[in-house]
Amino acid sequence: MPPAQDKQQRKNILISGASIAGLTLAYWLNHYGFEVTVVEKAAELRLGGQNIDVKGPAWEIAQKMGIAQKIRRADTTEAGIRFVDTKNKVLAEFPKGHPMSMTQELEILRGDLVKILYELTEDKVSYRFGDHITGISEQAGHTEVSFAGGKKAEYSLVLIAEGIGSSTRAMVFKDVVKFRYLGLYTAYFTIEKQDTDTRWARWCNAPGGIVFLLRPDPYGTTRASVTLKAKEKAYKNLDPEQQKKALTAAIKDAGWEAPRLAEEISKSGELYFERLSQVISPVWSKGRTAMTGDAAYCVTPIAGKGTDLAMLGPYILAGEIAGTDDHQLAFFNYRQKLESYVREAQKLPPGIPLLVYPESRTGVRLINFLFRIFGSRLVKNLALRLSRNKKAPAKTFELPVYKD
């Protein structure tokens, strides 16, 4: 058993990052009786972002947290997805709930889920916005943390719930983490709604390995994303204005609604433009520090389980910490329970995603032809019949049950 001082100290835990993973972790640690502080580099909650779906383990955890109805009420209102060509002609249409649709039963904006999670914890957890960790020094029985704001504090555990480019992870784990680049950059931003924007999402392939995706939101605006093939360092280390110029230059001759999007990019105040890479790490913890969410095992939006892991990992990590006075055992059990699920989530079908992003005009015509085939009444009805005849799928993950 650890000494009494250590046991008392471990009641005080620091989480770095106030996104979905960090806020879920804060909720569960507070639920188990820990004193929790969350430090976030941004001056306020980052409420931007695109549609995410809440399903599988994430939905089970949301129900346990009592936020299921709030998530339902925050639905994006998306009716389904339409695949269109650069003349905006509909090639295929899959309504919400169809087995071939990317619109899931529960679609919510990333920022709306962040807000729901924050409201659960804002009066129970200490939040420090506009600050970040600049130094971590492990001592006997605790960790001393230095902050950019000039303060120092002691915590029993430090838990990193930052993004794929986590600076705190680099500070603690050095270069042990590897990245699996998927050959794509993606940009997210919000634009003014126009007459061509409806409750249907629109996907358009364009030459140059470009995919445009416009999706409705419940706030009278439209969420836009541009994904394009590029070498890994093509847009690395650009400041926001340089990113805007590079992105508009890349899409200027792509057709469809590229001129509209280029104009919106130039005036966007919340452009996110980054490589799509998976995080592969041989370790998720070191001493009294552990990491979760994208910092530990980013799967990218293409894998489709980002929200699952952003809530599942913190749920397990908090439960294991609460179940023992030995933090190293808790960190070990956390990885043991989650690692195989992460490995499966990071697997992509052969040729995906690059086959979906053809560069030549011939390649675009071919994929548009395939969209027409899959969107035909015959294929859509066949897919519906097959899905109805299928047995209910087995659970992808059996959620551990932790005692309160």
Image (cartoon, rainbow, N blue to C red):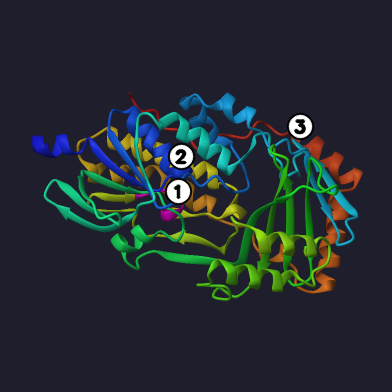
Name the residue type under label 3. Answer: Arg
The residue under label 2 is 312
159 sits left or right of 144 in the view: right
Write the start and end of the magenta stretch as one range. Answer: 291-296
Please rate how many residues cluster around mark 1, counting C-alpha atoms within 10 Å: few if below 14, some from 14 to 19, many from 20.
few
* Image location of residue 140, percent across then percent down: 11, 50
- Label 1 residue SS: helix
Q: Which sits earlier in the primary sequence, circle 2 or circle 1?
A: 2
The residue located at (48%, 31%) in the rendering is 61
The residue under label 3 is 388
190 sits left or right of 206 in the view: left
Image quarter of residue 136: bottom left
Q: Give the distance between the C-alpha atoms of the residues marked 2 and 1, in whole angstroms.
A: 13 Å
Q: Give the distance between the C-alpha atoms of the residues marked 3 and 1, in whole angstroms.
A: 29 Å
Give the label, 3 or 2, closer to the camera. Answer: 2
Looking at the figure, which quarter contains the C terminus? Answer: top left
The residue located at (11%, 36%) in the rendering is 1
Name the residue type under label 1. Answer: Ser
